[in-house]
Amino acid sequence: MNMSDARGARERLVVIGGDAAGMSAASQARRLKGPDELEIVAFERGHFTSFSACGIPYWVSGDVPDRDRLIARTAEEHRARDIDLRLRTEVTEIDLDRGRVRARDVDSGAESWTSYDKLVIATGARPVRPELPGMDAPGVHGVQTLDDGQALLDTLSRTRGPIDSVSEGRAVVVGAGYIGVEMAEAMIKRGYEVTVVNRGEEPMATLDPDMGRLVREAMEGMGITMVNDAEVTRLLTGDDGRVRAVATEDAEYPADVVVLGIGVRPETALARAAGLPLGEHGGLLTDRSMRVRGHENVWAGGDCVEVLDLVSGQQRYIPLGTHANKHGQVIGANVGGGYATFPGVVGTAVSKVCDLEIARTGLREKDAHRVGLRFEAVTIESTSRAGYYPNASPMTVKMLAELRTGRLLGVQIVGREGAGKRVDIAAVALTAGMTVDRMTALDLGYAPPFSPVWDPILVAARKASTKVRASMQGR
């Protein structure tokens, strides 16, 4: 018997996860179906809902003055829209055969089953936390949730705050991806002496090493100590049990606080236990409607799913809030009786450390090699504005184009103010499947305060187009 038969005509939607994808899905479904048609129950194991995890580094740094500014919609606001949101409640089991989930109250331990007609899995991601000695010591912090951010701020208040001009605290950031470099900036702004320990050849492994080198040089110029090609072996603690240093095979780096920026993995333990299909990266596999493959009444979105890369044609794991919110909109439309699809991504991301802007979209060189694409790569130097205009800042643009077709494959940008968001031009070109030759004719806006007469993206496209033609003529 369908669960809705026992409740009359009203169906029940159960959502696991109360952040971007989950609550976007719930909210969109509610817009399309009222509470007399659709009951919505959402479970969230944390204290907060609909918050911006991407904003946590800027809250920690002090750029965002208080936590509540990172909350897009409170639990009370969701409940006012007839969404039964249950905070501090963790789903521990999915029973696909009987259409129900088991949930546990985090504070009391009480458990109960809730049936569903339709299920949304939006369990997000979990930070990578290596099983090393000292990793669980006080003073070691991940930064995935608002609770994590508050715990870090509490530690900072016990070490060195921004008003303390007597002693300089020491922070070690483990990892140099987006979270790592953003947290390095946060610690610099908090007045800490910062060391970044990175296992890679250069920071920002989402870039090619030659572009990562530019990031490293800029970070070192800001006073950040970069330690690359280094594997953390253990965290050392003091007599009080708190972390005091990060150790590699070759050295020890004193620390009053350690921030983990090693990356995340899809949180799919529930899905795996239920027998739902997972990809090679550990994320749930869905169709274009975000319905879990092979399961008519189960959808999934956000950081727990894999997505189609429109450039390579392969499944990838790219955990970003932009994707999660779009997934939720698509899921909510479909659950609510409408129709929507999520076509895929090109892998666009932008970040900064202090005044350095870092952006990428599409494939890196090793990505292109891995999928068997032959390509040409070019790198150009330009400026954010006309060279004669005050405060024009330098930027480096790297572009990859497919050898035979000239199809754009990827763009990376490192520069100062005005550099990062130029990646959006490349993202649109990638999504449209444009060639670099066609890109040279793009009618972009120009005025000296905003761009040189030849925008840096167009300069790179022209150089790439020339190189592709020369390669083909030389064959």
Image (tube, rainbow, N blue to C red):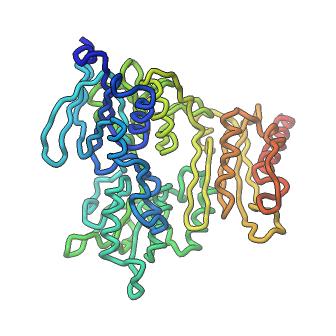
Is residue 37 positioned above or below 75 on the image? Answer: above
Res 92 quadrant in image? top left
* Residue at 39% from the left image edge and 37% from the top image edge: 22
Nearer-the-camera pick, 305 or 282: 305
Judge whether residue 291 can be spotted in this image.
Answer: yes
Res 98 quadrant in image? top left
* Residue at 23% from the left image edge and 32% from the top image edge: 93
Q: Given the current orientation, which residue lies at the most extreme top position?
A: 1
* Residue at 41% from the left image edge and 82% from the top image edge: 163
Nearer-the-camera pick, 98 or 306: 98
Judge whether residue 227 can be spotted in this image.
Answer: no
Q: Quadrant of the N terminus?
A: top left
Q: Quadrant of the C terminus?
A: top right
Q: Given the current orientation, which residue lies at the most extreme bottom position?
A: 166
Nearer-the-camera pick, 48 or 306: 48
Q: How many marks?
A: 0
